[in-house]
Image (cartoon, rainbow, N blue to C red):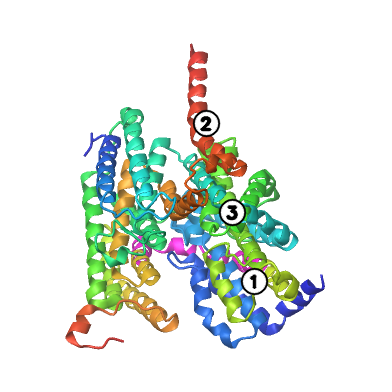
Amino acid sequence: MNKLNRTYVMGIVFLLLSAFVVWQTGMVPERLVSNEPGPRFFPYMSAAGMTVFAILSMIFDGPKDKGNQYLDKAGWKRLILILVEGLLFCVMMQYIGFWFAAMIGIVMFVLTLKGDKKVNMVTVIVLAVVLGSVCYFGFTRGFHIPLPSGSLWKALGIKML
Amino acid sequence: MAAYLTAFAEIFEPLNFLMMIVCVVVGGILGAIPGLSGGLGITLILPLTFALDTNLSFIMLVAMYVGGVSGSFIAAVLLGIPGSAASIGTCYDGYPMTKKGKAGKALSIGIFGSLIGNLGGGIVAIACTKYIADLALLLGPWEYFSLCLMAITMVIGLSNGSIYKGLLAAFFGFFLSTIGADMVTNQLRFTFGNTNLYGGINVVVLLMGTFAVQQVATSYAKGQTDMPPVDAEGLSGFGLKAKDFTDNMQTIVVSLLIGLFIGFLPGMGSGISNLIAYGQAKNMSKHPELFGTGYDPGIWATEVSNNAGVGGALIPMISLGIPGDATTVLLLSGMTIHGLQAGPMFIKTNPDMAALILLTLLISAIAIALIELGTKKWFPLLLKTPFHYLFGAILVISFMGAFSSTTSMFSVYLVLGFGVLGIMMDYFKMPATPLMLSFILGSKIESYFRMGVSYAKGDYTSFITRPISLIFLVIAIGSVVVPPVMKALKNKKAAKAAQ
């Protein structure tokens, strides 16, 4: 990863994306309403713009890109870890509901983000329970905004609060 | 004048005044929490107003609106995460200033910027509502299209890095805005059979992903384990000197005018005006290189303009019955609930109500500024919270904010996806602002363009044959062409001088 020219990588990613957009746009049925450009026009324009500026960026910015390191190996590992935990939190939110997911998620995130620092587990658990509960009940009862109650409980026939 | 005296007396009725303070504070808190907004507060209290007196209802609704926009700078300054789209630009200099230990000064600029924006916008709204609204009626889809395009290109001009990467980000934002059902023919685009995408991508979802998740993940990956230190300077009292105002007077005045102008255009709002004002402040500055490093004018520009947009948005709402932004749509609903008909006759038939709305804007702005000044010293307590507690909670709240905006689990996964996108953009050194702005404006640009072509019976030249539209287009092209040309000339001159 150290010597990779990020501008060239970006250019290739966006050129591929533009090609995909053009291909997908061609599949949109063209039902023209009188005298107007139709639903394909703007996606085509977006793809054209991405293509042009991806190429221009590769030509003019590419040579200036020194391939500096973005993250070291440990940094990449940390990045992947926090994203995987984010995904795990989303899955928990869907299946066991926001209330439990928030409590478990806060503990999980705090223990990861602390790095080498020491934390008091009692404080972490109290924070998780209080914040998770305040958010869940504040939203669902106070603001009447629904939050996920968990599809697992529904499947098991358990009625959550 | 009599209408304003009556409105003044009405606002200072004990119950009305108390509810105004409560709503302005609640609005401020909602605005400060990433993913929530004053609009949410208005939505929540709107059903309550069925049972309330009309005057009290509008005092509460307008106070909530003012509080929501005013409070949104707090998270932007302290955490680098915008409370709402209205304070995206505030992150660029507010958070770097906090990182330098000057959170107190950044907060003071936010408070006074909001106050000046609200007061300036409110006073102009009181004085010129009728005349400004007439001007808005002169503009058609051609001018709106060109104006939106100009807004984006001006913001690309503020990209610190490559202008090509800025334009690439803008076109990518356009593409994201086309996802969902086409607004004219209702054809589905890029939905892949997923019903969650039929309505397009929600702006809160994109904001939470590209700002909140990206911020937490990259900070942790780069080894950050501590929050920025907080300097006690500027945390008590006003936190600013007279020189801070006089030095930034030009930025303040221009940003006020930009905020008002963008605010009174239907469909535009503070989410757009703050970025345009930031771009303009950078273009006008003698030190554009200092923007993004914790530079005062960057915060003044965004906070004055987004709050001026409140007064601006009320102008077409009151005088034309056209909402200036998403929140004024809710205020219009409130008017309908109470049997009031906004439009050209509103000021004549309901002078007391028009005066009450505009005066509540001014008094709420002063109230929230005083409350924020009085409690400012406690805001940075947030930064004393250990990194792992604060950012852990932010992650959970961001996912919750995305769900509450759409009530869809798909949006929660999408936040994570946009978090990855934000990280990729950081990796590629692509600016996020053009992406956000073109995403917000993308559907409007497409809609105005297609309306313009359709109204002109398929004539694409109508965009350049209408003088106002042409002016906007010339500025749009100039704002992306002139900076690199000037830079090249400067480099050539420097190279010549070196020889």
**Are circles 2 and 1 on residues that touch, CB within 8 Å?**
no
Earlier in the chain: of badge 3 and badge 1, it is: 3
| Label 3 SS | helix
User: Mark 2 and mark 3: span between their CA atoms?
Assistant: 24 Å
| Label 2 SS | helix
Residue density around tag 1, few if under 14, some if 14–19, many if 20 or more, within 10 Å: many
Depth check, mark 2 against mark 1: the one in front is 1
Earlier in the chain: of badge 2 and badge 1, it is: 1
Q: Which residue: 65% across, 85% down?
A: B53
User: Mark 3 and mark 1: span between their CA atoms?
Assistant: 20 Å
User: Mark 2 and mark 1: span between their CA atoms?
Assistant: 43 Å
Residue extending farthest to the right is B2
Which residue carries the number 3 mark?
B262
Q: Which segment did they paint magenta?
A: B365-394
In the picture, measured across the screen, residue B234 lies left or right of residue A7, that is right
Q: Nearer the viewer, residue B155 or B313?
A: B313
**Are circles 2 and 3 on residues that touch, CB within 8 Å?**
no
- Spot occupied by residue B159 in the image (x, y as percentages of width and height): 45, 41
User: Up-down: is A56 above or below B115?
Assistant: above
Whether the magenta-drawn stretch holds residue B23 is answered as: no
Q: Which residue: 22% across, 88% down?
A: A158
Residue density around tag 2, few if under 14, some if 14–19, many if 20 or more, within 10 Å: few
Mark 1 residue type: Ala
Q: What is the magenta segment's predominant secondary structure?
A: helix
Which residue carries the number 2 mark?
B482
